[in-house]
Amino acid sequence: MVTAAELEVIMAAIATPYDAAGAVDTGRFAALVEHYVGRGVEGVYCCGSSGEGLLLDAAERTRVVATAVEASAGRIPVVAHVGALSTSESILLAKGAQDAGAVAVSMIPPIYYSYPADAITAHYRAVMDAIDVPMIMYNIPQFTGTEFTADSAADLLSDERVIGVKQTAHNMFALERMRDRFPDKAYINGFDEIYLSALAAGARGTIGTTVGMQVELFLAVRRLAERGDLATARTVQSWINEVIAEAVASDVFPAAKYLSGRVVGDLGPCRAPFRGLSAESRARLDALGEKMDGYIAEAAKL
């Protein structure tokens, strides 16, 4: 069974490649995992926001996880996001992820309808009752309308089957309060642009959209923070944030997917209703990729 410490690592929220027909391209996906392992990525998070999980069907999501597990060959942990509209579908996805070899599952709270807190807790517990691998709660209130805090999530954080929280929120106070009250859990930053701030607030790991394409910068921030060189760590965080700002200007998920395919080959566009990147956006992202390479080269000297 995976431990909390083993999940407090620098983990790529991996994109899902498609072939020319729009089907999941498992060969290209395996190549991307291998590329990430070679560059120092310490884990992969499948079928989250960056992986277009809610735009994939259940069979596709399970196949993505199985491909990641096979490609990683035990070298890094594979975590599967299994959030869905219904409890029954999340249970199906969680069982599929467990059977595929994921070391843990992660899940947003149920979305669209407004559910009371006890219904959300029951949803998580029903999924955990169906599997034997641990759960990472996915706190992303700007997408779900539900925010987990030390108080609102106390029942779930008291459950030993909940191994940690993916904190994709800017609320550093809430993150620190959760860690203070439930110190044995894994606290994992979910916003790349505040990685250094999250480290200060108590996070130890990160799962992010841009991690895979600039993992060397995240490794440098952690190394510098551990060394106590906060001034240089802030400089590297600003490099990360320059890349993020430019990606956001082009539509962050399609942009990050495009940049992630620079070495392994075209990963295909994001599925509709995402819009394709314009020629102008691709040109801007090509220039951004060159700038990012320069930052990576500089980070290697730190």
Image (cartoon, rainbow, N blue to C red):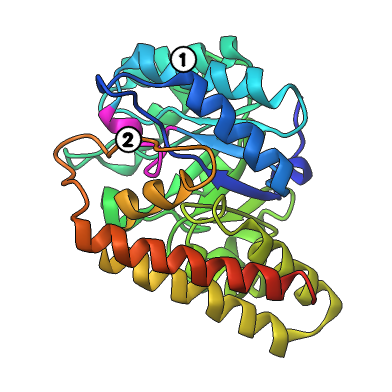
Asked if marks 2 and 1 touch (Cβ < 8 Å), the reply is no
Asked whether the viewer can see residue 251, the reply is no
Q: Is residue 101 above or below residue 106?
A: above
Q: Is residue 54 above or below residue 295?
A: above
Marks 2 and 1 sit apart, C-alpha to C-alpha, by: 17 Å
Does the magenta-highlighted stretch encompass residue 134? no
In this figure, which residue is indicated by the disc labeled 2? 268
Residue drawn at (79%, 85%) of the image:
229
Return the disc, 2 or 1, that comes first in the chain's sequence. Answer: 1
In the rendered image, residue 95, in percent from the top left (x then y), is placed at 50, 12
Does the magenta-highlighted stretch encompass residue 49? yes
Q: Quadrant of residue 69?
A: top right
Q: Quadrant of residue 88?
A: top left
Residue drawn at (22%, 52%) of the image:
277
In the rendered image, residue 126, in percent from the top left (x then y), is placed at 44, 20
- In this view, the residue in front, 180 or 74, is 74
> In the structure shown, which secondary structural element does the residue marked by tag 1 occupy?
helix
Residue drawn at (62%, 30%) of the image:
78
For badge 2, the amino acid type reads Gly
Q: Quadrant of the N terminus?
A: top right
Q: Is residue 236 above or below residue 42?
A: below
In the rendered image, residue 66, in percent from the top left (x then y), is placed at 55, 16
Crowding at label 2, few (<14), some or many (≥20) Cα neighbours within 10 Å? many
Q: Is residue 291 left or right of residue 84?
A: right
| Bounds of the magenta segment | 47-55
- In this view, the residue in front, 126 or 155, is 126
Asked whether the viewer can see residue 3, the reply is yes
Crowding at label 1, few (<14), some or many (≥20) Cα neighbours within 10 Å? some
In the rendered image, residue 279, in percent from the top left (x then y), is placed at 21, 56
Of the numbered discs in the image, which one, if any, rests on residue 264?
none
In this figure, which residue is indicated by the disc labeled 1? 63
